[in-house]
Image (tube, rainbow, N blue to C red):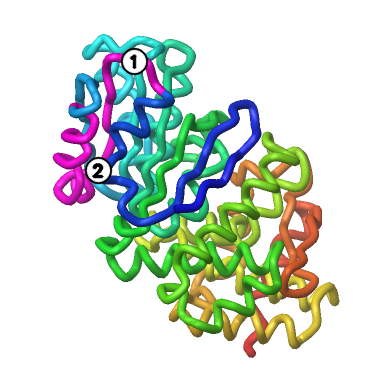
Amino acid sequence: MKTITVKATKTYDVMIGSGIFDNAGKTIRKVSTGLTAAVVTDDNVDVLYGNKMAKTLAESGFRVVKYVFPNGEASKNTETFLSLINFLAGEKLDRTDVIVALGGGVPGDIAGFAAASYKRGTGFVQIPTTLLAAVDSSVGGKTAVNLTAGKNLFGVFYQPDLVLCDISLLSTQPPEVYKSGCAEIIKCGIIADRDLFESLKSPIHEQLVDVVTRCIKIKRDIVTEDEFEHGTRKLLNFGHTVGHAIESLSEYSLPHGLAVAAGIAVETAISYKMGLCGKNSLCDILDMLRRYDLPDKTSYGADEITQACLSDKKRIGDCLTMVLPVETGKCILKDIPVNKLKETIQAGLEIDV
């Protein structure tokens, strides 16, 4: 087992290995003195792991309650959030109790936002069951739900007390969900670790613990430097400006990671057209996306993507910050004026390599 310590507004451990889930109750008890553990999960994950989660918590002395909602991004909304808050109040949780997010990014985001909001803050533990959540959303403290106007517009930064990343839980994720995680791993390599990027030429599933560990260390280092995303942390948004727009335009029928992959392709092409990265880097990045059967383009046009981008939370005034690669392992932040956004996106869509 490997342990990574994140030092932010809370200092907490991320534990990575196989079989950690078997003793999750005992491990959570070390960071919680509360009487009640509220498990928040979706209906798919509940069938797989809900009873086992409840059992290990009960064996460690917790009263266990469980909130289950329909799986999918469509549930990441204010209705689910408020329903969960009312559930916690009905179960009379107090500040010493713990909310356990069991699942992918959607349960993690909703549970984390509820943990931050209910009684102004309760205990919070993340147990990711998808590769995407393991390498990205379970670490770093971003919690939010979507609004009609855009993705993740309603939320707060709230660090967990513990993250238990049991690699064996990832074996039950559907292929499309696994591919979403691969996209985020490729992103990590492009923004911060060329050696990681090169290592992905060998299948990720053959080096899972090492790859997950390296991604979490990258995120740990960035979050430690810039927890509230005033500067460096924005690098983690590579592929997400265009990706979130594509995801929104698909009405969330396209999984997050696949939308991000398409965003990576378009934003890399934009960087190439601006002369920031060379053709070799462009080809390397597109080839890596194709290696994992990820989208390397989108059918949406510049008009549609631009309008969706204008609701992005990364827009500040008359500029939108885009992350653009200089080479694999290094990206920069580039402010794109809103009045130049459509032509910038159009330039990225025109690249065909």
Element at badge 1?
loop
Say which of 283 and 39 sits in front.
39
Residue 119 in the figure: left or right of residue 52: right
Magenta stretch: residue 54 in it?
A: yes
Image height of 48 relative to 118, above or below:
below
Crowdedness near tag 2: few (<14), some (14–19) or many (≥20) residues, C-alpha within 10 Å: many
Residue 109, percent from left and from top: 43, 38
Q: Which numbered marker is on residue 34?
A: 1
Where does label 2 land, which residue? 42
Residue at image point 28% right, 14% down: 35
Residue at image point 39% right, 21% down: 32
Say which of 237 and 185 sits in front.
185
Residue 281 in the figure: left or right of residue 28: right
**Image depth: mark 2 or mark 1 in front:** 1
| Count of numbered labels shown in the rendering | 2
Q: CA distance from mark 2 to mark 1?
A: 23 Å
Q: Tag 2: residue type?
A: Asp
Residue 201, percent from left and from top: 55, 83
Q: Which stretch did the figure color magenta?
A: 32-58
Residue 336 in the figure: left or right of residue 346: right
Residue at image point 27% right, 18% down: 36
Image height of 30 relative to 239, above or below:
above
Element at badge 2?
strand
Residue 146, percent from left and from top: 45, 39
Image height of 282 relative to 96, above or below:
below
Q: Earlier in the sequence, mark 2 or mark 1?
A: 1
